[in-house]
Amino acid sequence: MFALDNLKIGAFRGLRDLDLDGLGRVNLLVGPNNSGKTSILEAVPIFCHPVDFLSWFDVTWRREAPLKPEKPFFMGMEWMFPHLRLGDGPVVSDQVTISGSGKCVVRSVRSTYEIRTRVGAHAAPQQTATPYQQRGAVIQVEGRADSDPKSLSRAFELWEGETVALSEYQGWPRLPVRTVSPVDHRSEATQMAELSAVARQGLIDWILKMLRSLDPEIRDIRILTPQENSPAIFIDYASSGLIPLSGFGDGVRRAFLIALVLNSARGGVLLIDEIELALHVSALETLFSWLVRACEEFDVQLFATTHSLEAIDTMIHAERGDLSRIVGYRLKPSGGSVKAQRLEGQLLSRMRIEHGFDVRL
Amino acid sequence: MLYGYLAVEGPTDVEFVGRLLRASGLRRVQNAYEVDDLWRILIPNEYPPGGDLLKRVPVPGFFRSDTHSVAVESAGGLDRLVPAVQDTRSQLFPRWEEVVALGLMADADQETPPDRFQRLRNALQEIGMPVPVSVPGEISDGRPRLGIYVFPDNLRQGTLEDLLGECAAKVYPGLLDGARTFVGGVDRTVLTQEDVEEAAKPSGEIKATLACIAGFLVAGGTLQVSVARNRWLRDDALALDNIAAVHTFLKHLLGLNA
């Protein structure tokens, strides 16, 4: 059993009635632009931690970052909810519904989004507060878990100009779900904590081995504090000495991030958007072979989107010993909706290797 | 446009079927830009397939008229026929529904036509394809129409080469006699085991005979090329009972008038 064996997205963003049956250890999502690949990656953490507002926040933040100051955060969240036009009337937001099964205890999620307004007040020092129409939203979430006969409901209120307290819901067993977006490797802040965890677990050599397979000059990784209160990750490079991680190319930085995040996704789910991003074709095989083995070793279920045939072929090659571990899902927009076509590993391999079919089309 | 997909065992079968389709008014599509939109996704955009420099590019033969468009795929052997159907159906998703006719054509070289038919029927069912036909040569209604033809005639054990032998007897009787005399007169005692291995296989002798004819007609060419270029399946040959039966099967399956 995987973290997720099946996932049915009833309604989420632009996706409706999308079935991902028979999920595998490695799940590759392919399809044209705007077919919903990234939306599927976003639906997974929402499904796995439905009553945890942190997951809703994180998904919105990743899509909206950097947030435009003039755009209230809740407006970004609104577009997680499918939108419907009722007859000739206005467009209204519909509910999010996702269901699934697997090691994840959650079985279904239902959520609504309601726009609210109220009279707020701008606080101005030494002046009378100025009343104004404050915009906001209420997000009502109902989750049902395998272990819990009753559904669990929580509501979150978001108001323009106000912060919201984020906390994890600890009531249900928490499945690790980690995401690597196309830009995450540029942000070092979270990597520092991940690297510290890796160091505590004695896994620095494990990461170094992978990095050296991409660049043999890499000798060591360290956290240094070149300026007071501003620690940074440095790589000990054979020919140049200590170089900040930010001085390396995107390929090494992304591989480094994937390794860190994989470690923290043990027993859970790793979501990688555009898995081939920043990686030269010569590095794909090395990294993907390592990634597939590591997912197996750490019991991590991988969901990855890609536009790259080389990435698909390399994954197939990496899994050639047991193609049952890899599953492709081809997203096909058709008649205003998107269908997911499941391609089990053997079939995907034949289509790519024997026929040379462009399975992205 | 009415779309049909045929899975056959090898490249000679593609040309054999292609000649019969030409007799029904379809022409071979040579330029990629002329391939119907539905089929274009079946054209590989890279080489070599699977990294194998010795493999031919796995692209179906495309035949079309103003009303019909047919893809004939050389699957690469009996066991590859149904996987070829599965792979093509998957690649065409969700437009496979536009395919109105599906045909499989196989030799009955190692087993009887009913047994070969049953083997293919079972394999199709295993990939979730309904098979509402119960004997070789039968064509189902529905969408896609389905038929499985077992060479040479759905009744006898044999191969496509038996049919081409009949064609040669009709169209190239002199060449056939000469080729038979040559192949039959080979002194195998002066050859090695390796030399005679292929000729000793079932259908080896007829294949060698037909290859001699093809080699003369195309001057060093293969049977596949000769079937496409020469008169094997033209004029009188089309009236042969067993050739007409295959042609009729294709016409009914694909909904061709001529």
Image (tube, helix red, strand yellow):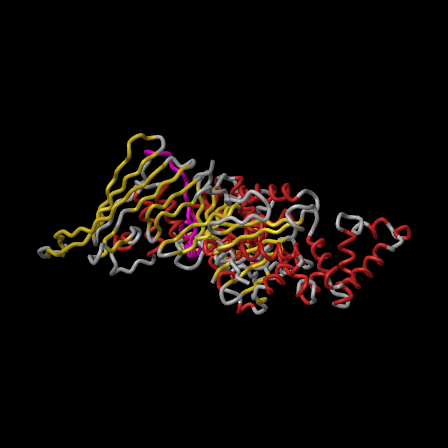
Residue at image position (49%, 39%) is A299
Q: Work out whether residue A300 or residue B198 is closer to the camera in this orientation and state it.
A: B198
Q: Along the horizontal axis of the image, is B233 left or right of A39? A: right
Task: Residue A330 in the image: state x and y as whole percent.
Answer: 46, 52
Q: Along the horizontal axis of the image, is A300 left or right of A73? A: right
Residue at image position (68%, 42%) is B111
Q: Work out whether residue B108 or residue A135 is closer to the camera in this orientation and state it.
A: B108
Total marks shown come to 0
Q: Give the range drawn in magenta.
A: A171-192
- The single residue placed furthest to the right in the displayed view is B190
Instruction: Check residue B75 for magenta coloring.
Output: no
Task: Residue A72 in the image: state x and y as whole percent.
Answer: 24, 56
Residue A209 appears in the rendering: no
- The single residue placed furthest to the left in the displayed view is A128
Task: Residue A67 in the image: state x and y as whole percent.
Answer: 30, 58
Q: Work out whether residue A343 or residue A232 is closer to the camera in this orientation and state it.
A: A343
Please tell me in which quadrant of the rendered image residue A134 appears. Answer: bottom left
Residue at image position (62%, 55%) is B246
Task: Residue B176 in the image: state x and y as whole percent.
Answer: 78, 60
Please tell me in which quadrant of the rendered image residue A50 appears. Answer: top left
Residue at image position (10%, 55%) is A129
Name the image quarter holding the C terminus of chain B.
bottom right
Residue B222 appears in the rendering: yes
